[in-house]
Amino acid sequence: AQATAQNYPPPTGVYCSCGPTLGTGYGSVDPAIAAKPFVKGILVRVPWRLLEAEDDVYSWKLIDDQIAAANSFGKKISLGIGNGGGIPQWLYAKGAKQIVATSPRVDTIAVPWDSIYLAQWTQFVAALGNRYNADTTIQLVYITNSTANGFEMQMPFQSIPTLANAGYSDENMTSSWKWCIDAFNAAFPNHYLSNDFHPVNGSNAVADSVYAYAQKAIGSRYGANAWWWTQKNAQTVYPAQYAISLHSAKNNKFTGVQFANSGTTDSAKFGSGGMQGALQLAIDDGICYWEIWNQDILNP
């Protein structure tokens, strides 16, 4: 049965798409960002390998410190655990199959449909939920999987072995995502959940199937996210995933976008209207949760 929604409003407004939390500096919660009154929260990204450096040995200090920092400014957190290249090395020693991605970035990731990887990831997500499933500073939890960058949905464009030789099929990839959805839904039965949508291996089939499954499995606590948001991408590059965003936005107000570029340094990449135009497009579409780059938040 679906759990009822948490007794707090869904995350909306400006969140910072800040840097990852790696145990150096401020992590994701930059005081200069968190002090801004219009900033509602911070996206906190932490790689799995730093939270479970040894099998079954968990260290939550990085997340705890980010929660404390956010609380000190009266801000909320969206939490994303980095999978993909953020996977701990001991997983491969246990026999999990791997792919060496060569494009669009060089990284080693686990084969997403590998049974050893899925079992260990589920175990970790359960431990994560056991630690934080009652924490309301965390308002949104991202469902992540072993993908090209460990947060977004797309797989490597080129890899050794090739995806085909590693056993890729749309069905295997979709099954892996369903497994992750079930793991996060079980671990966080009262939190709002989301994930990014991209084409996978040149097809829209995985994204469409995963969205339909997540909607049914999670219900009103689920909203889609587009981590590629610009007017150009919405209207010409990712029309099928844009359709997912539009459908999701009709059902909830925490359907989200993460801006693909900085409006301060790369305004031309957005298309007509720059970053402001991209924000207005989201508002016009009823998409009310926006992750904006830190340099743009700090730009008067």
Image (spheres, rainbow, N blue to C red):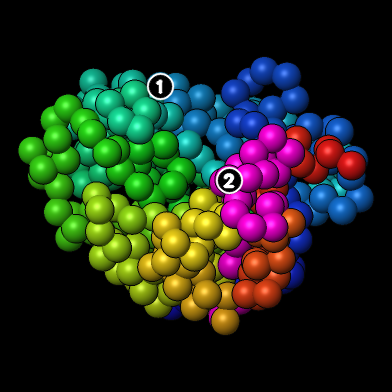
Q: Is residue 30 above or below residue 147?
A: above
Can residue 4 be seen here? The reply is no
Left or right side of 215 for 162: left
Query: How busy is the neighbourhood of tag 1: few (under 14 within 10 Å), some, or many (20 plus)?
Result: some
Read off the residue under disc 2: 269
Q: Amino acid at mark 1?
A: Glu
How many discs appear? 2
The Cα–Cα distance between marks 2 and 1, rounded to whole angstroms, is: 42 Å
Q: Quarter-wise, where is residue 170 in the image?
A: bottom left
- The span picked out in magenta is 251-275
- In the depicted view, which residue is nearer to us: 299 or 54? 299
Left or right side of 1 for 201: left
Q: Residue 25: where, in percent of width, then height?
A: 73, 19
> Looking at the image, is mark 2 or mark 1 nearer the viewer?
2
Read off the residue under disc 1: 54
Q: Going by the picture, which residue comes out furthest to the bottom? A: 250
Left or right side of 298 for 164: left
Query: How busy is the neighbourhood of tag 2: few (under 14 within 10 Å), some, or many (20 plus)?
Result: some
Give the quarter of the figure containing the N terminus: bottom left
Left or right side of 232 for 94: left
Q: Residue at x 44, y 47 (%)?
A: 152
Q: Residue 65: where, in percent of width, then height?
A: 72, 31
Can residue 250 be seen here? The reply is yes
